[in-house]
Protein backbone atom coordinates (compact mmCIF):
# COMPACT_ATOMS: atom_id res chain seq x y z
CA UNK A 1 0.00 0.00 0.00
CA UNK A 2 1.36 3.40 -1.01
CA UNK A 3 1.32 5.84 1.93
CA UNK A 4 1.17 9.60 1.53
CA UNK A 5 2.47 12.36 3.73
CA UNK A 6 -0.28 13.63 6.00
CA UNK A 7 -1.55 17.00 4.71
CA UNK A 8 -1.17 19.71 7.34
CA UNK A 9 1.26 17.78 9.55
CA UNK A 10 4.28 19.86 8.64
CA UNK A 11 2.17 23.00 8.84
CA UNK A 12 1.10 22.14 12.39
CA UNK A 13 4.70 21.47 13.38
CA UNK A 14 5.90 24.73 11.83
CA UNK A 15 3.23 26.79 13.57
CA UNK A 16 3.99 25.11 16.90
CA UNK A 17 7.68 25.91 16.55
CA UNK A 18 6.92 29.51 15.56
CA UNK A 19 4.61 29.99 18.53
CA UNK A 20 7.36 29.01 20.97
CA UNK A 21 10.22 30.79 19.23
CA UNK A 22 8.38 34.05 18.60
CA UNK A 23 7.05 34.17 22.15
CA UNK A 24 10.52 33.75 23.59
CA UNK A 25 12.48 35.94 21.19
CA UNK A 26 10.44 38.93 20.19
CA UNK A 27 6.70 39.04 20.15
CA UNK A 28 5.42 37.84 23.50
CA UNK A 29 1.63 37.53 23.42
CA UNK A 30 1.56 37.53 19.60
CA UNK A 31 2.67 33.90 19.76
CA UNK A 32 -0.97 33.11 20.56
CA UNK A 33 -1.79 33.74 16.89
CA UNK A 34 0.59 30.99 15.79
CA UNK A 35 -0.73 28.75 18.55
CA UNK A 36 -4.25 29.09 17.19
CA UNK A 37 -3.05 28.41 13.65
CA UNK A 38 -1.06 25.39 14.84
CA UNK A 39 -3.95 23.90 16.78
CA UNK A 40 -6.26 24.46 13.81
CA UNK A 41 -3.83 22.64 11.48
CA UNK A 42 -3.44 19.90 14.05
CA UNK A 43 -7.18 19.35 14.23
CA UNK A 44 -7.56 19.12 10.46
CA UNK A 45 -4.63 16.73 10.07
CA UNK A 46 -5.84 14.58 12.94
CA UNK A 47 -9.31 14.25 11.40
CA UNK A 48 -7.77 13.15 8.09
CA UNK A 49 -5.58 10.61 9.85
CA UNK A 50 -8.45 9.16 11.88
CA UNK A 51 -10.56 8.68 8.75
CA UNK A 52 -7.92 6.46 7.14
CA UNK A 53 -4.86 5.82 9.35
CA UNK A 54 -3.19 3.35 7.00
CA UNK A 55 -3.04 5.82 4.16
CA UNK A 56 -0.91 8.54 5.79
CA UNK A 57 2.49 8.89 7.42
CA UNK A 58 3.74 11.73 9.59
CA UNK A 59 1.24 11.59 12.45
CA UNK A 60 4.12 12.13 14.89
CA UNK A 61 4.54 15.64 13.46
CA UNK A 62 0.93 16.35 14.33
CA UNK A 63 1.43 15.25 17.93
CA UNK A 64 4.65 17.25 18.25
CA UNK A 65 2.99 20.32 16.71
CA UNK A 66 0.13 20.08 19.20
CA UNK A 67 2.50 19.86 22.17
CA UNK A 68 4.57 22.79 20.90
CA UNK A 69 1.42 24.84 20.32
CA UNK A 70 0.29 24.25 23.89
CA UNK A 71 3.76 25.15 25.19
CA UNK A 72 3.67 28.34 23.10
CA UNK A 73 0.23 29.14 24.48
CA UNK A 74 1.41 28.69 28.07
CA UNK A 75 4.46 30.86 27.46
CA UNK A 76 2.37 33.56 25.77
CA UNK A 77 -0.15 33.65 28.59
CA UNK A 78 2.64 33.76 31.18
CA UNK A 79 4.33 36.59 29.30
CA UNK A 80 1.03 38.48 29.03
CA UNK A 81 0.38 38.14 32.77
CA UNK A 82 3.92 39.34 33.51
CA UNK A 83 3.46 42.32 31.19
CA UNK A 84 0.16 43.30 32.82
CA UNK A 85 1.70 43.08 36.31
CA UNK A 86 4.77 45.03 35.21
CA UNK A 87 2.72 47.86 33.75
CA UNK A 88 0.48 47.82 36.83
CA UNK A 89 3.47 48.23 39.15
CA UNK A 90 4.81 51.11 37.08
CA UNK A 91 1.44 52.86 37.09
CA UNK A 92 1.19 52.31 40.85
CA UNK A 93 4.61 53.87 41.43
CA UNK A 94 3.80 56.83 39.21
CA UNK A 95 0.45 57.47 40.87
CA UNK A 96 1.94 57.14 44.36
CA UNK A 97 4.65 59.66 43.50
CA UNK A 98 7.53 57.26 44.18
CA UNK A 99 9.48 58.41 41.11
CA UNK A 100 9.57 62.05 42.21
CA UNK A 101 12.58 61.42 44.46
CA UNK A 102 14.86 60.54 41.54
Image (cartoon, helix red, strand yellow):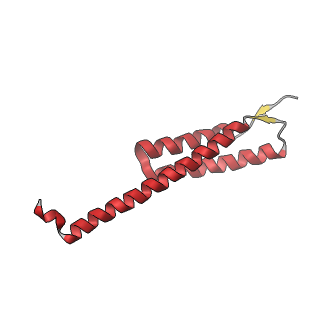
- Left or right of 68, for residue 54: right
Residue located at (81% from left, 31% from top): 3
Residue located at (11% from left, 63% from top): 101
- Left or right of 75, for residue 91: left
Q: Number of numbered discs present?
A: 0
Does residue 31 appear in this view? yes
Does residue 34 appear in this view? no
Estimate the x, y position of residue 46 in percent, counting from the top left: 74, 46
- Left or right of 37, for residue 98: left
User: Quadrant where the C terminus lies?
Assistant: bottom left
Estimate the x, y position of residue 20 in percent, counting from the top left: 51, 43
Estimate the x, y position of residue 63 in percent, counting from the top left: 67, 42
Which residue is farthest bottom?
96
Q: Place residue 25 in its image quadrant.
A: top left
Reply above or below: 60 against 39.
Answer: above
Reply above or below: 87 against 17.
Answer: below
Which residue is farthest top?
2
Estimate the x, y position of residue 60 in percent, counting from the top left: 70, 37
In terms of depth relative to the viewer, which is nearer, 83 or 37? 83
Which residue is farthest left?
101
Residue located at (43% from left, 53% from top): 79
Residue located at (49% from left, 50% from top): 75
- Left or right of 78, for residue 62: right
User: Quadrant where the N terminus lies?
Assistant: top right
Amino acid sequence: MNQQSLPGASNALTMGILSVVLTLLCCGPFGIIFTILGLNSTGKAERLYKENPGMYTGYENVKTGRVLSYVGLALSIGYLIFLILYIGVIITFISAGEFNDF
